[in-house]
Amino acid sequence: FIGAFLALALTNNSIGIFTILGLIMLMGLVAKNAIILVDFTNHMKAEGKSTIEALILANHARLRPILMTTIAMIFGMLPIALAGGAGAEWKNGLAWVIVGGLTSSLFLTLIVVPVVYLVFDIILDKLGFNKKTRTIDELLDEPYVHKDVLEYETH
């Protein structure tokens, strides 16, 4: 939201229904970029890569799709943001929110999301939540023997 409100302030736009709609759209777009990055990182970790290596690979692999969608959306919103005429002041706020928000979120997605992921991964390691999970067969002390419900004794 930092870039969105900064763009509104720089263009002297106020918050209205269209700017709030732009903020809602912005939340979806930014979340999509973060999900793409985190999902790819999780896949790399599942293949046996370390967290840092997985984050670097994810940033390299997902940089182009994130850049392309962000730049396409920004250039798509510029005509609306720069438009004049009747009713343009209503829609300008929506476009400036998206342009400013996507510009700032591009850098936040590529820098802050991996850092936060790494911090949480370190915390989970220290708490013991990132241990390799064992299958149910490994957890059982005795071999499992299937019994029908009628075979159990009732007291």
Image: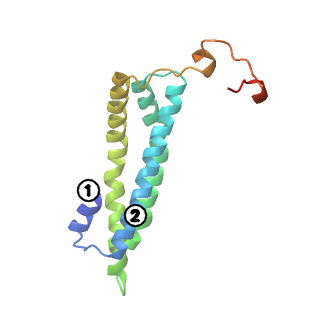
For the point 31% across and 60% down, the residue is: 100
Gap in angstroms between the C-alphas marked 1 and 2: 14 Å
| Number of numbered markers | 2
Quarter of the image for residue 88 reads bottom left
| Callout 1 amino acid | Ile
In this orientation, which residue lies closer to the viewer: 141 or 24?
Answer: 141
Per the image, the residue denoted by label 1 is 2
In the depicted structure, whether residue 72 falls above or below residue 147: below
For the point 45% across and 38% down, the residue is: 38
Q: Position of residue 99 (x, y in %)?
A: 35, 62
Tell me the element at label 2: helix
Q: Position of residue 103 (x, y in %)?
A: 33, 54
For the point 36% across and 40% down, the residue is: 113
Which labelled disc corresponds to residue 63?
Answer: none
The residue sitting at the front extreme is 155
From the image, which quarter does the C terminus lie in?
top right
Quarter of the image for residue 98 reads bottom left
Tell me the element at label 1: helix
| Callout 2 amino acid | Ile
For the point 35% across and 75% down, the residue is: 17
From the image, which quarter does the N terminus lie in?
bottom left
In the depicted structure, whether residue 105 falls above or below residue 18: above
Which labelled disc corresponds to residue 24?
Answer: 2
Q: Position of residue 39 (x, y in %)?
A: 50, 38
**Label 2: few (<14), some (14–19) or many (≥20) C-alpha neighbours in 10 Å:** some
